[in-house]
Image: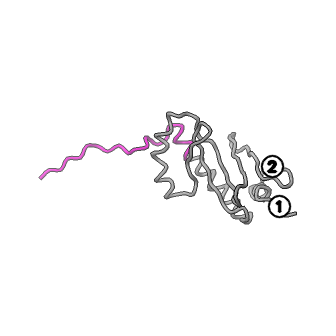
Amino acid sequence: MSRTAIERLIDAIEYPERVPDGATAATLRVDGREVVASISGGRIVLSQRISSELDKLPSLAGFAAGRMLREDAVLAYGDGGAFLWMDASAGADERTLARLFESFMDSCDWWLERVDGGEGEASPQFSEMVIRP
């Protein structure tokens, strides 16, 4: 029996815990936070809740369009909170899965900094501009 993308991901990132043979979902504990890995529609999907505070959504949404140009992780809302997700083909090799995980965790770190109030508002603040003849 061939290993699932979850099993190969676990091996690729050298996660210390094992998952059951044939696993199609797993919750990984990374830096004190939960990362959910699941297989859906031939894709492996990584997701992490970044905030359950509804008042933070407008600020986070202000960053979403610009971040989509820089990274493949996507901000979404569901189950009462904002979460980040990223996916790849479930048939990807271990090296690709390791890169997926690394990129996803980098994205999570960036978003979690914004949730904690880092680096200002979603909209840049411009000083008043005056044009003189």
Give the percent coordinates (x, y) of residue 115.
53, 39
Q: Amino acid at mark 2?
A: Pro
Q: Amino acid at mark 1?
A: Arg
Mark linked to residue 16: 2
Number of numbered tags placed on the structure image: 2
**In the image, 127: left or right of 62?**
left
Helix, strand or loop: magenta stretch: loop
Which residue is depicted at the point 69% across and 42% down?
Answer: 34
- The residue mark sitting in front, 2 or 1, is 1
| Picture quarter with the N terminus | bottom right
- Residue in the image at 84% along x and 64% along y: 2
- From the viewer's side, name the closer residue of 30 and 68: 68
Mark with earlier residue (2, 1): 1
Mark on residue 77? Answer: none
Disc 1 element: loop
Report the side of 132 relative to 11 (left or right). Answer: left
**Magenta stretch?**
110-133
**19 within the magenta span:** no
Reading the image, the residue beneath label 1 is: 3
Residue 25 appears left or right of 74: right
Question: Could you say where residue 10 lies in the image, as x and y percent from the top left?
Answer: 77, 54
Q: Secondary structure at mark 2?
A: loop
